[in-house]
Image (tube, helix red, strand yellow):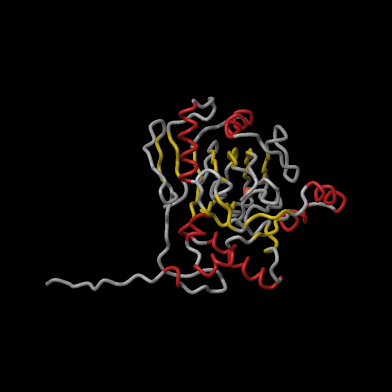
């Protein structure tokens, strides 16, 4: 017997309803690279995809050695196409980690976080699992800066027996899937970013004031354009975006709550389970991340080196 299956029309994505909690059901557009982007094979690296639009493990590279220009070009292309790259078992020294990141530009110092072996190495030492933590919220790093980081290189030195994963979300996919009426509201809009909501509680007032003069609130576009791919990406995050400029507080809060929720959509995400010595290298312009805090009372030690970025447009 032949079973006839009627073609089921797909719902028009742009007409999806916009619920208050930011989630909607149905088909999602999942484009990994921008339209018109020419994909070429990789000749110097092996790439194993870990997610639909975001995340790939790179094999066949030793990050402790300086990169040949052609290899660096391939890694940069992979970073643009996959947004976060994973390298297993590198066991880099802090100096090697800095040298690797330094091949992407000037390194960033971050006076808000614990210093590692040098000013441009940030050390996250959750020794007992009870150290206060603030990375388990969806965010892009340092968007309170005028020039937020281009990207970051994170290595795990100590890993709990289970847990302590990191998740990343593709903010180009998040933008692509916004309903048309939301895009119309935010295209061209600007938002205020400030380190205070994310960090103020960790500092006494006498330390906070000088930091506020170094990092006053800044405005960035709500939708930024990737400087290397030209792709449009949602650029607001829970940790640092405090309001949409020129909008009533209540409307701004409601719209931001909705936009923040987009990073929570599983289709835009990849999740990485660490082993000691693994390295992740992410494009901080195109992604948000979330360090899962599920490993107390075990420890977790990571070091991060960030690459200075440019002014979002
Ligand atoms: Fe972060």
Across and down, in percent, residue 263 comes to 55, 59
- Within the image, what quadrant is residue 247 found in? bottom right
Question: Seen from this angle, which residue lies furthest right?
Answer: 206
Q: Quadrant of the N terminus?
A: bottom left
Q: Nearer the viewer, residue 222 or 92?
A: 222
Across and down, in percent, residue 220 comes to 66, 54
Residue drawn at x 41%, y 39% is 47
Across and down, in percent, residue 64 comes to 54, 27
Q: Is residue 51 visible?
A: no
Q: Is residue 31 visible?
A: yes
Residue drawn at x 62%, y 44% is 300
Residue drawn at x 42%, y 57% is 30
Q: Nearer the viewer, residue 10 or 291?
A: 10
Residue drawn at x 72%, y 44% is 113
Q: Nearer the viewer, residue 87 or 102?
A: 102
Query: Up-down: is 28 above or below 298?
Result: below
Q: How many marks?
A: 0
Question: Seen from this angle, which residue lies furthest front?
Answer: 188
Across and down, in percent, residue 72 comes to 50, 31
């Amino acid at each position: 017997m032949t079973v006839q299956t009627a073609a089921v029309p797909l719902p028009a994505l742009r007409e999806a309803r916009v619920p208050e909690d930011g989630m909607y059901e149905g088909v999602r557009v999942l484009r990994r690279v921008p339209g018109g982007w020419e994909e070429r094979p990789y000749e110097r690296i092996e790439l194993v995809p870990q997610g639909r639009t975001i995340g790939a493990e790179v094999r066949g590279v030793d990050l402790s050695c300086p990169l040949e220009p052609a290899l660096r070009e391939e890694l940069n292309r992979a970073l643009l196409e996959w947004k976060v790259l994973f390298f297993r078992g590198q066991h880099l020294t802090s100096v090697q980690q800095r040298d690797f990141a330094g091949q992407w530009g000037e390194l960033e110092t971050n006076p808000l976080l614990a210093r590692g072996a040098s000013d441009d190495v940030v050390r996250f030492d959750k020794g007992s699992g009870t150290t206060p933590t603030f990375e388990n919220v969806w965010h892009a790093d340092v968007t309170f800066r005028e020039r937020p980081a281009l990207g970051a290189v994170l290595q795990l030195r100590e890993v709990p027996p289970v847990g302590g994963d990191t998740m990343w979300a593709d903010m180009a996919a998040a933008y692509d899937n916004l309903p048309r009426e939301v895009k119309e509201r935010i295209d061209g809009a600007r938002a205020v970013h400030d380190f205070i909501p994310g960090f103020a509680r960790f500092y006494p007032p006498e330390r906070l004031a000088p930091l506020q003069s170094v990092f006053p609130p800044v405005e960035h576009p709500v939708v930024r354009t990737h400087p290397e791919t030209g792709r449009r990406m949602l650029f607001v995050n829970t940790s640092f975006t405090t309001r949409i400029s020129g909008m009533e507080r209540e409307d701004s809060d409601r719209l931001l709550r909705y936009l923040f929720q987009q990073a929570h959509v599983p289709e835009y995400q990849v999740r990485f389970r660490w082993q000691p010595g693994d390295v992740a290298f992410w494009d901080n312009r195109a992604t948000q991340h979330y360090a899962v805090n599920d490993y107390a009372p075990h420890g977790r030690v990571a070091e991060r080196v960030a690459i200075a970025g440019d002014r979002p447009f």
